[in-house]
Image (spheres, rainbow, N blue to C red):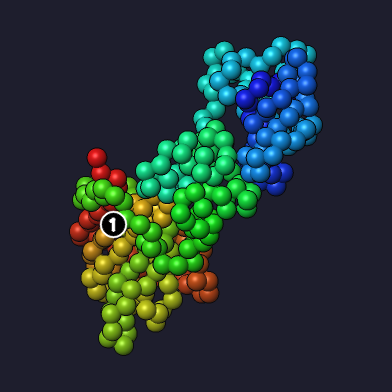
Amino acid sequence: MRAHLGDQLVVESPATGVARRDGEIVGLHHDDGTPPYDVRWSDTDQVSLVFPGPDAHVRHMGHGTPPSGHGNPPSGHGAPAAAGTASPAAPAAGDIGRRVAVERRRRGLSREETAGRARMSPDYLAYLEEHPADPTLATLVRLADALGTTVAALRGGGAGLPPGRGHALLHPRLRDLGLEECRALLSTHGVGRVAVTAPDGRPAVVPVNYEVVDDTIAFRTAPGSVPAAAVGTDVAFEVDHLDEALSQGWSVLAVGPASAVTDPDAARRLTGGAYGEPWAGGEREMWVSIRPARLTGRRISPGP
């Protein structure tokens, strides 16, 4: 392990492999950049002498090649890619980092301003926004205070609440989706909602696990259930995705006749090709298919 002044020491969680603690290296004890290091921790702003363990690595902050000496940097942490091989793609941001970035931009704050308010390194804030991380409670408390929000909100504490409770985008763009885009989004399978007239004559909207086979929507249910009432009628089927952290999403609506899959071979093929079992459990061996006669959709995204 080699480091320069200004590099970051990242300590990973042994259970999840994501960053748990982070600090700036402010002091070297050997000319070749080997440990130990004086580290100013971003969550406490305190400096301590650190002998890094196997769960730690150095994140080089644009100083070029680390100081020369015996040994090599750990694979994947500052080592150049071998000739002819592509560097591994950077990991996607974690949910906490995305929420922090959204709140920061919503308030018109730069990373430097936010880091100053939260008493942490701007480099650590950049790392948090761009990588999966597991910051300490103290870090989240300071970030929440700096952004005028709560720790629960940064952690996604509203996960058990109905979707769409977040702030709207400052300049939202609502556009209609083309037929091919609707088909592509619908074919991702998962959970959708079917609108039917229930056996008691009342309208009902029921979530179901569904599959898409040859442009036909299919779901499993039990005879006599509310979803089974779709058979022999024209129904509406809707699937959507909402990104709470970014306040954007899409929805696709299919309208068409529903029928029971009565051919045993066709039913077996659907069962064998299904991506999973219905979440509701129980005996659900009746397949219902919907052949869309009309397919429309909309997407909300940031405007110019």
Q: Position of residue 286 (x, y in %)?
A: 42, 71
Of helix, strand and loop, which one carries label 1? strand
Is residue 2 among what the camera can see?
Answer: yes
Seen from the viewer's position, the closer of residues 175 and 254 is 175
Q: Quadrant of residue 231?
A: bottom left
Q: Where is residue 287 in the image (x, y as percent from the top left)?
A: 40, 68
**Residue visible at 45% across and 67% down in the picture:** 161
Taking the image as shown, residue 205 lies to the left or right of residue 304, namely right
**Residue visible at 38% across and 59% down in the picture:** 166
Q: Position of residue 1 (x, y in %)?
A: 73, 23
Q: Name the residue under label 1.
A: 252
Amino acid under disc 1: Val
Please tell me whether residue 91 is drawn above or below residue 198 in the rendered image.
above
Q: In which quarter of the image is residue 4?
A: top right
Please tell me whether residue 106 is drawn above or below residue 284 in the rendered image.
above
Is residue 58 among what the camera can see?
Answer: no
Please tell me whether residue 91 is drawn above or below residue 247 in the rendered image.
above
**Residue visible at 62% across and 25% down in the picture:** 6
Please tell me whether residue 70 is drawn above or below residue 146 in the rendered image.
above
